[in-house]
Amino acid sequence: MLQRILAVVVRSATAAVALTVALVAQTPLKLQTVASGLVRPTFMASPPGDAQRLFVAEQPGRIRIVKNGALLPTPFLDLAAMGVVSFGGELGLLGFAFHPSFASNGQVFVSHSGFPFPTAIVRRFTVSATNPDVADPASGFVVLSQPMLYGNHNGGMVAFGPDGYLYIGLGDGGSTAPSWPDDPLNHAQRGDSLLGKLLRLDVDNPQPPLPYGIPASNPFAGPGLPRDEIWALGLRNPWRFGFDRATGDLWLADVGGMREEVDFVAAGDVGGRNFGWSCMAGTYCNATSVCACYAPSLTPPFHEYTIATSSRAIIGGYVYRGAAIPDLVGSYFFADFNSRQLWSLRRVQGGVAQLQSRTAELVAPAPATLAGVLSFGEDAAGELHLGDMAGNVYRIVPDGPLVAGVSPFGLGTPGCSGVHALFAPTTPRLGTTAFGLRATAGAPGGLGAMAFAAAADAVGTDVGLGCRVHLSLLSPLLLLQSMVADAQGIGGVAFAIPAAPALVGYTLHAQALWLWSPAACAAVSGGFSSSNGVTIVLQP
């Protein structure tokens, strides 16, 4: 139909060609250097809404700032100069998190190894009243101090969840030969220990004598064990976890003994899950007596792997929610420190889809070589970064020029599989035999439609079907073409663009709609969700 419409524009007699489902290979990726000359960058993040700065933790104890592309010489915070950080091996500055109200209260929470050796410590600092690029060292306040056993399996990730509470990952305290890699004192399963746990604290409402509060909704809050701070247990070394900024889902990567695992907890879960360590490492029965392997009370990993020929350590990342790589929105990125491999995958109906190696793509720009990845991070726009042992921080970007003639607009409304992204992987050039549009996050096998119009509605109109439409309903051209999502929830259409010079500059607007039934989504009784809109300007 679109080809016929384009033909009318140039008064061509070209026969119409029906739109067909078109699946195009994923956008190729590369690494772009953001900063170099750092010392073991263990974490990176931007304050909410801060498009100018990326904060980077260095394991010896400093937090640096990359501001407008330049690494500032003065650290934001220097725990080493304060003499409070224990550094070496797996010890040091391990993570930080900005308070959701950082713009108004200036609070940042820092996770580090300290004294007496070894102790896991979380401190709160406040930004200097005179310089927003420096924290006030005198403002340091210890929120949590937890003795560890050895210098390994520290965990160290801290992050605020969508509920506003601070989540803290603590490893099982470590071990040495001959006990390694087990948890010799069973901390991960013991209710009287905070080790091997994911904690959930209310840092805004302390309950003296505690320097923090216990959320009433914590799964074990109340008399008796397990301890009130615990939100999940059975973890070995939860080095990195993250919340999907679009859905609120938790993705947690636990460094294993026999298996490396990714654990998944859906947004709104009440907590209290037991991920099985140390009786189980992923789905591998570790044959200890601390709990029964494969018990119904244990939560298996969403994804796991092992590497038989080398040591391994999973580095968890994030679900991509940026704008630079539309077809990878909703993909989870992670890496392995020892084998130096990188992957992405999607979660579709509780299973793994599109598991893809990114190792060959994500190489350091010459002459650098990507060393062991230490951490992923997100900037304020949701673009993904990673830091490596060589002291470099990179951004994951498309490998190629931006698509000309394609501009997204509007937001649409998310569906039951998350936020939809509509995009064109290629430039809409004259003479293209199959210019394609792709829409993500549909129900696998589900029915959808691609809508086209001559006029756009950037604000959007709620048409009463559960979705916001960004195409003008008064447009002189308004048509729909059906599409079906594949097993990964991606659907699309393709059409030919006549090789007619008069078409250069012709503008068309598109939006994807997905239909949800109770069978595909228990959250709705039936209705639509929508993607962002896309403006297509034909190129010569």
Image (spheres, rainbow, N blue to C red):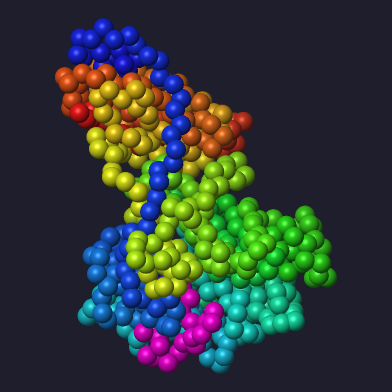
Give the answer, above or below, for where 278 lies relative to 51. Answer: below
Give the answer, above or below, for where 380 lies relative to 278. Answer: above
Q: Is residue 540 left or right of residue 346?
A: left
Q: Residue furthest toward the front?
A: 367
Q: Is residue 75 left or right of residue 255?
A: left
- Magenta span: 78-99
Residue at the (40%, 15%) spot, across then down: 18
Residue at the (58%, 87%) spot, across then down: 118
Q: Quadrant of residue 225?
A: bottom right
Q: Is residue 402 visible?
A: yes
On the image, the x and y values in percent for residue 156 come to: 53, 74
Q: Is residue 233 visible?
A: no
Name the residue nearer the viewer: 231 or 378.
378
On the image, the x and y values in percent for residue 478 come to: 31, 19
Q: Quadrant of the N terminus?
A: top left
Magenta span includes 80: yes
Residue at the (31%, 25%) spot, across then down: 432
Magenta span includes 77: no
Q: Quadrant of the C terminus?
A: top left
Q: How many marks do you count on the picture?
A: 0
Q: Quadrant of residue 453?
A: top left
Name the residue nearer the viewer: 418 or 279.
279
Residue at the (48%, 76%) spot, across then down: 94
